[in-house]
Amino acid sequence: MTKKHNFYAGPSIMPQFTIDKTIEALKDFAGSGLSIMEISHRSKEFQAVMDEAQALTKELLKIPDGYSVLFLGGGASTQFLMIPYNLMNKKSAYLNTGPWATKAMKEAKLFGEMVEVASSADKDFSYIPKGYEIPADADYFHITTNNTIKGTEILEDLDVAMPLIADMSSDIFSRPIDVSKYGIIYAGDQKNLGPAGATIVIIKEDILGNVDRDIPTMLDYRTHIAKGSMFNTPPVMPVFSALQTLIWLKDQGGIPAIEKIKNEKADLLYNEIDRNKLFVGTVAREDRSRMNICFVMNEEYKDLEGAFLEFATGKGMIGIKGHRSVGGFRASCYNALPIESVQALVDCMQEFEAAH
Ligand SMILES: *Cc1c(COP(=O)(O)O)cnc(C)c1O
């Protein structure tokens, strides 16, 4: 079997450590004689998993006091509606940097006035808008830090006057962040943390309780904070797997070490895209995503697209076909992807160039 290099955008590559530990726990969890799938979420063994996952998240991201870490069901997409439900009285502000931001905005419109402060839709979301103004009376400002589909990324922690809400589904744990600048950080686990099924939500407790409406119990963040993510049955196995990835992240040297490798991987691939006569990047250089790297064939080599995909697939590359809305190629280089896989893709690009 050829070694597979997994560039899927999500669900996506996980550390082998996470997979091995999950297999063990599926057979016999913590020496209990039961599978992780069979055990009560109220058992002391699982409570320890939840506690450690929350504690390690706080440690790795240096989360200050006053924040809670939740692991919820429903995916990042449920956060699109829970955020306005819990935080928006009259007005909210959104930065539209791509299809996920657009989906979040659609939900906010159900709860009041949603102000799009800026959008890069005019150029197919190939850059991050800058120099916009946020209405001072907005209840919060929502951003999507990494545009998984189009391949742009906001690499700094913005300073804003209202709670900053960030969808970090595809770049959480890839760089150190100043959590104190955020009201909520959320991410579906299936890109950078674990299997699909759990969503991590980091929330500043004092931004809650300021809306006039009644909130259904299950959609009220205060419910989940009060019950430590155990109001209802949490996604038990995905939380266990997420914990294994957190342990792995710490073992790698924590977030600063991960960021260094991430930048090495991204530089390696972008340098090849820029050097190779066959390929060209699709987004503004200063806004290039370090996680989801999008590129297409250069205009004069357009008809080689299918041939390159076939060539690279034959060499073990998986999931490099670009999103249907962009075409070309997308290499998702999440934390668990080894640099050897990026090198293998670069080798493919060079071999293919030499043959054409
Ligand atoms: C994948 C993704 C989502 C959707 O996540 P689900 O868990 O499938 O709901 C939302 N935002 C971003 C940035 C994503 O990459």
Image (cartoon, rainbow, N blue to C red):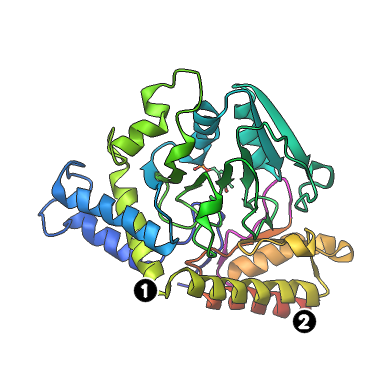
For marks 2 and 1 on the same chain, the one whose residue lies earlier in the sequence? 1
| Quadrant for the C terminus in the image | bottom right
- Residue type marked 2: Ala
Q: Quadrant of residue 321?
A: bottom right
SS type, badge 2? helix
Query: Where in the image, quadrant-wise, is ligand 1 located?
Result: top right
Q: Name the residue under label 2.
A: 354
- Residue type marked 1: Asp
In the image, what residue occupies the spot 49% across and 29% down? 86
Q: Where is residue 134 in the image (x, y as percent from the top left)?
A: 73, 39
Marks 2 and 1 sit apart, C-alpha to C-alpha, by 40 Å
Q: Can residue 3 be seen in this view?
A: no
Q: In which quarter of the image is residue 293?
A: bottom right
| Quadrant for the N terminus in the image | bottom left
Q: How many numbered discs sit on the rendered protein?
A: 2
**Relative horizontal placement of residue 43, taking residue 290 as reference (left or right):** left
- Residue 220's disc number: none
Q: Position of residue 303 (x, y in %)?
A: 82, 60
In the image, what residue occupies the spot 18% across and 41% down? 42
Name the residue nearer the viewer: 206 or 1. 206
Relative to 196, is 17 above or below?
A: below
> Is 347 included in the stretch rendered in magenta?
no
Relative to 73, is 64 above or below?
A: below
Name the residue nearer the viewer: 105 or 271. 105
**Relative horizontal placement of residue 141, taking residue 128 as reference (left or right):** left
> Is 326 included in the stretch rendered in magenta?
yes
Stretch of the chain drawn in magenta: 315-327
Q: Mark 1 points at which residue?
A: 251
Q: Can residue 202 be seen in this view?
A: yes
